[in-house]
Image (cartoon, rainbow, N blue to C red):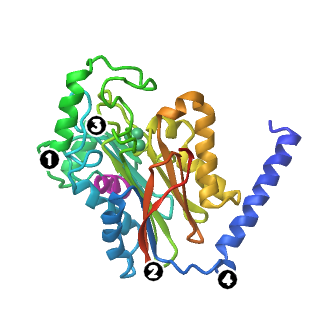
Amino acid sequence: MINRRKFIQASALGSMSFAFNKESGCKSKLTPLKGKPLVISTWDAGLRANKAAWEVLKNGGKAIDAVEKGVMVTEAEQNCCVGLGANPDRDGFVTLDACIMDENFNCGSVAFLERIKHPISVARRVMEKTPHVMLVGIGAQQFAVAEGFPLEEQKLSPDAQKSYDNWLKNSTYKPPAINIESKQGHGPFAPYKLDNGEWNHDTIGMVAMDINGNLSGSCTTSGAGFKMRGRIGDSPIIGAGLFVDNEIGACTATGQGEDVIRIAGSHTVVELMRQGFLPEEACKKAIERIVKIKGDKAKDIQVAFLAVNKRGEVGAFAIHKGFSYAIKNGEKEELVKSKSLME
Ligand code: GLY
C-alpha cells in the first residue's frame, strides 16, 4: 500500500507535471516556434539525412514520414556504423537494429536483423501492421520478406572490411566482457576513438517536429563493431535509444548502448523535460547519471543524448567532446558541436 509520505510526493510530482503539461498543451501560451518544422539528427551524417527529412516537412508532411525517409539515407550510405555495409559482428555478419515512434506512442522496432537494406522501414511496418512493438532475428527477417523487402547479399563497405580484417589480426575470437575495453583493435565500443582522438559516430537518431507541431523519431544502427553475435544495443529499444512524448518532447541517443539502456536514457531525458528542464539540461543530467554509475570507466565510453521539447528548443550533451548533431529548419541548416562533461 502506498504510504502517506510517498502519496504526497507522488501528488506533488503529478501536479508539477500537470502544470507543465497544461502550459505546453495550450497553444496560446506556447513560446512562438520560429523554427517549425524542424529536424535534428546525430553526427555529421545527419546533415544528409536531414535534407531528405526536410523534403517531407517543408511540404507539410508528417514527422513520422520525415524521420523514416531521413534515416533511410544513412542506411543506404556505405559507412562504418549504419546499414548493410557497416562493421560486422565477431563472426563477420552485419546485424541491424532500428526503431521508430510517432506522436501517439505508436512504436515499432527490429533488432538482430540481417540482409535487409532498410531496417527502419521494417520497424515502421511492425508498428503499423502487427500487434507487437519488437521483432528480432530470423522472425524479423521473415516478416520483412513477407512484407516485400528484398533479401540482400551482405557486402561490407571497403572501410568496414578493412576494420574487420584489422580487428581479426589482433583480436582473439574469445569475446571479452563488454564493459572492459579491449586493448586489441577497437573493442566492443561504439562509437570508438579514432587515432586522432576524435570519436567515430555509430548510430543515426533523428527527431522531427512537423508543421502541426507533432513529434516523431527514428533510430538505426549496426550497433557496436565486432560485437558478440546476438548483442543488441539501445538503438532498437523504445525508451533507451529513442522516446517521443508528444506533449513534452523527444530524445534520441548515440554511443555505448549498454549504458544508455542501463538508465532508460531517452525516456529519462523526456521525463526530465517534463519536470521543466530544458533539453540541454535534461541531456546533461542523464549523462551525469551514467558517469556517476560508471565512475572511472566513464573515460572509456562515449554516450550522447539529443533532445527537443514541445516548444522546439533543442539541446544535446555528451560524455566526451567530439559529438555533433545536425539541425535543419526553415532558417538554418548546420552541424552543431555538443557540450560535454569531459574534454
Ligand atoms: N548505440 C548503438 C549501440 O550501442 O548499439
* Ligand 1 position by quadrant: top left
Distance from label 2 to label 3 (Cα)? 42 Å
| 2 and 3 marks in contact (CB < 8 Å) | no
Q: Which residues are magenta?
A: 120-129
Q: Which residue is mark 2?
A: 331
| Amino acid type, label 4 | Ser
| Amino acid type, label 1 | Leu
Q: Which residue is mark 3?
A: 137
Q: Which residue is mark 1?
A: 151
Circle 1 residues within 10 Å: few <14, some 14–19, many ≥20: some
Of labels 3 and 4, the one closer to you: 4
Q: Which residue is mark 4?
A: 28
Tell which circle, 4 or 2, labels the residue nearer the N-terminal end.
4
Residue 62 position by quadrant:
bottom left
- Is residue 315 at all visible to an observer of this figure? yes
Distance from label 4 to label 1 (Cα)? 50 Å
Majority secondary structure of magenta residues: helix
Left or right: residue 283 compared with residue 66: right
| 3 and 4 marks in contact (CB < 8 Å) | no
Residue 230 percent coordinates (x, y): 32, 30
| Amino acid type, label 3 | Gly
| Amino acid type, label 2 | Glu
Residue 27 position by quadrant:
bottom right
Tell which circle, 4 or 1, labels the residue nearer the N-terminal end.
4
